Image: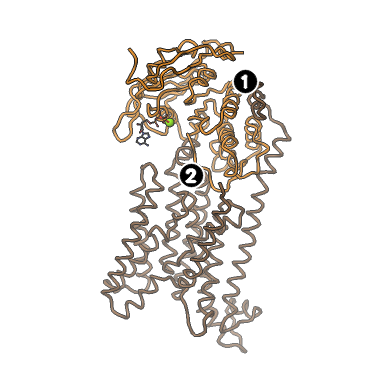
Amino acid sequence: MTADLLTHAGARAGARDVTAVDSVDVAHVVRARRRPARRVRLVVATLAVVALAAVLVRVLLGDYVVALTDLLPILRGETLPDVPGASFIVMEAKLPRALLGLLAGLAFGASGAMFQTTLRNPLASPDIIGISLGASAAAVIALTFLDAQGLWLPAAALVGAVAVCLIMYAVGRGATFAGQRMVLVGIGVAALLSSVIQLVMTRTSIQDAQAALVWLTGSLARATWPVIGLLSVATVVLAPLLAACARWMRLAELGDDLSTTLGAPAGRARLGLVVAVALAAVATSATGPIAFVAFLAGPTARRLCGGRPSLWAAALVGAVVVVLSDFAGDYLIPDVNLPVGVVTGALGAPLMLAVVVTAGRAGKA
Amino acid sequence: MTSSTLARSTADGVAVRARGLTLSYDGRRVVDHLDLDVPAGRITVVVGPNGCGKSTLLRGLSRLLRPTEGSVHLASDGARDDVWSLRPREFARRVALLPQSPPVPEGISVVDLVGRGRHPHHTLVRRWSGADDEAVARAMRATGTLELAERPVDELSGGQRQRVWIALTLAQETDVVLLDEPTTYLDLAHQVDVLDLLRGLNRSRGTTVVMVLHDLNLAARYADHVVALRDGRLVGSGAPADLVDEEFVAQVFGLGSRVIADPVTGSPLVVPTSTHHQSGPAP
Ligand SMILES: Nc1ncnc2c1ncn2[C@@H]1O[C@H](COP(=O)(O)OP(=O)(O)OP(=O)(O)O)[C@@H](O)[C@H]1O
Ligand SMILES: [Mg+2]
């Protein structure tokens, strides 16, 4: 017998009765399964607390400090006799910005992680593969050539983002290596859209160019309650859908063949991408593209969770980064208000290097 | 013990039946009107030269590629089901496929990866349960991967990793398991390891195993039934002792050889005589 000739430890594995199950083994499996899950839960809970703290910091601190004890009365709509301006500043400036940052950050973070995990490619994030640029280009075109204003601008941005998605979906449909193709086509589309934007900007008036800038860098300056309302509704509708698609995403990680033979055809995981696209598109239409957030939230969350991707953690990382970057952009340099996209862009480059370097070290194989 | 004495009586039935199976990529025919009966509860090994369509055949049997002509049926308890009439999840509870080299999700632990094999047994309302833990424990015990449970898969050796992939397919708990070259990248000891494991599974659980192997000698040693392809056509099938001889090797691989009895198992052992491929099938 070959198995006996070879002194290989595992060689006798095949001789065991494979129908029996040992309760010790089951306990071992349960333990091994739960430990990392517990870490992910801990990270998500911690991030949720940090995100809430970031919102509080954004609302209370800065040029105009509001006392924590004053916040609740202000939210209840009471007027405070000793700080008359506080209510207006919180309700019309600070709170909307914080909430818009929170919602947009959640949306960018979750959609980026969904893309990267499903397509098994760290480059596959909405800001790299042209979805954000689709929104920018459409908004800039609407602004310059159609004189669009108000809510028509986010609407145009939404159309632009969705149009890019449709192109990518058409390219990926039914093809082998669909994921790779979608990413490559997306990068090409992104390059094309950049030059379209450049072209439009050369044709535009100074005033329009100033307004268009918002759609190129990403900013929370247009935070108004109607925009926040729309974005909250979209998030509340899309988040559970995204969570439902997450289990297909976990199978998509195994490659198209294996996920199909496990009962989840590759097209189904791409359904999750549609939801992710919708999230990114809605968020971009409210804030413009905020550089690097969708791209980096996933890998950062993954590092925190001990190597495994978690949509919730990625969403919360996105929220924390956007809210705090907006805060920093407002107050870091005196008398200069940097849009949030400029701050995340400046932070993002070194952070990206850090992610690449540590990832290279972790994956020594 | 030799594989021929282990083989069961020929009375048991057919697990998978292909008739006139034709598979194409972009209109190019790769598998051509193939008739195939996979005996239930046996080990079938598919052999043939590179590019002859072995992987494509497995893709056709496992619903990854829709036939341009012909059909594939699954048989159990007398009933026959066209594989394309089953819902994906239903099919996944009956047939498992291990592709040639599936991508390893980044940072995934062994137990987590094996657990993915339970997906076909879940529904929107019925998620993970104790039965899943038991199936995973069984699969990991059978493959000797329990000790690795918490290790990240990307840190394992090629042999350990292959056992983990097999554990995933076992956790799926199907009657039919298809494996595409489960022994590539493995040293000889690990090859024997994996094949012993599959044979143990087949003998104790009665699982029908279909696998592609490149090593004709290992194929002859472990197969109950050998299926030989060349240019997408069936050129022979049967028990290795009846099928594998010098003429067979020349016909399938275009290779001159001597075939002797394996001193350990008695199965046919192919010793190539010429170092050059002959140009086409021998007369
Ligand atoms: N996705 C694909 N698209 C187009 N052609 C393909 C595809 N996959 C395989 N082929 C072609 O089909 C033929 C059979 O390929 P297949 O992978 O089935 O061969 P194989 O017998 O498994 O070979 P090997 O021993 O090298 O694994 C080859 O000519 C190959 O080029
Ligand atoms: Mg192959």
Task: Provide residue B190's location: percent of width, then percent of height.
Answer: 59, 30
Three-letter code, disc 2: Ala
How many other residues sit within 10 Å of disc 2, few (<14), some (14-19) or many (≥20)? Answer: many
Q: Are marks 2 and 1 on the same chain?
A: yes
Residue bearing mark 2: A252
Q: CA distance from mark 2 to mark 1?
A: 38 Å
Badge 2 sits on which subunit? A
Residue bearing mark 1: A2
Task: Provide residue A147's location: percent of width, then percent of height.
Answer: 29, 74
Q: Can you tell me whether the CB of the residue at mark 2 lies under 8 Å from the nearest atom of ligand 1? A: no
* Element assignment for label 2: helix
Colour of chain B, in one word, is orange
The brown-tinted chain is: A
Query: For this view, does A135 lie left or right of residue B90?
Result: left
Three-letter code, disc 1: Thr
The image quarter in which residue A216 lies: bottom left
Depicted A275 relative to depicted A5: above or below = below
Quadrant where ligand 2 appears:
top left
